[in-house]
Image (tube, helix red, strand yellow):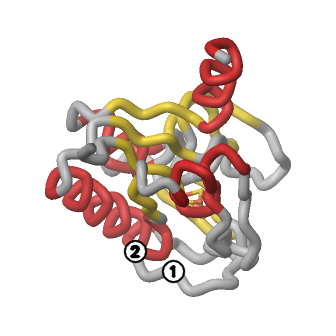
Amino acid sequence: AQRTMMVSACLAGVNCVYDGSHNRQSHFAGLLHDGEVFLFCPEVLGGMRIPHPPSEIRGGDGFAVLEGRARVVSRDGRDVTEFFLLGARKTLAFARKHGVKTAVMKAKSPSCGCGKIYDGTFTKTLIPGFGVTAALLKQNGIEVVSDEEYLSVVKTEE
Ligand code: SF4
């Protein structure tokens, strides 16, 4: 069967989180193992090295970044917006090329967050909004869903 779903690579166990860790959940590792999903990591695609300091969006969410009204900054004060924009564009190009319809994305990430993200103060404060890549995919008609939402539906169906 053709794959139409892609999953944040860290959810399948790839060590691509900013600090070199992963967010492996057995359900997503299983989907990868069965050849049912593509993996993607916008921050790696955008050229961020691992490890690097954590980043958050300041002044809005991913949609605001796409419109030039907000920036992505790292905790050490560096403006990393261009990396995040490049990663988002590359992820969209990949999704289009492979006919991806749905992206399951790691909750709360400044790239992948869907519905809530951190507010840019590095105090673990959540605000409503989307990460940069989630916003660009959504804007282009690709369904985006957080891992938390996805797994709650899977569990209900079981
Ligand atoms: Fe990469 Fe997204 Fe996972 Fe961050 S949340 S490590 S950007 S796949």
Q: Position of residue 58 (x, y in %)?
A: 58, 51
Vertical position of residue 6 compared to residue 73: above or below: above
Left or right of 4? Residue 75 is: right
How many residues crowd mark 2 within 10 Å: few (<14), some (14–19), many (20+)?
many
Crowding at mark 1 (Cα within 10 Å: few <14, some 14-19, many 20+): some
Towards the viewer: 122 or 28: 28
Q: Are marks 1 and 2 in contact (CB under 8 Å)?
A: yes
- Image x and y of residue 56, in percent: 63, 56
- Name the residue beneath numbered marker 2: 46
Residue 93 placement (x, y as % from top left): 20, 59
- Measuring from the top left, give residue 1's x and y in whole percent: 27, 44
CB of residue at label 1: within 8 Å of ligand 1?
no
Cα–Cα span, label 1 and label 2? 6 Å
- Relative height, residue 52 to residue 155 (above, below): below
Residue at screen point 24% across, 46% down: 2
Q: Element type at marker 2?
A: loop
For ligand 1, the image quadrant comes to bottom right
- What amino acid type should be assigned to the residue bearing mark 1? Met
Q: Residue furthest right?
A: 123
Count of labels shown?
2
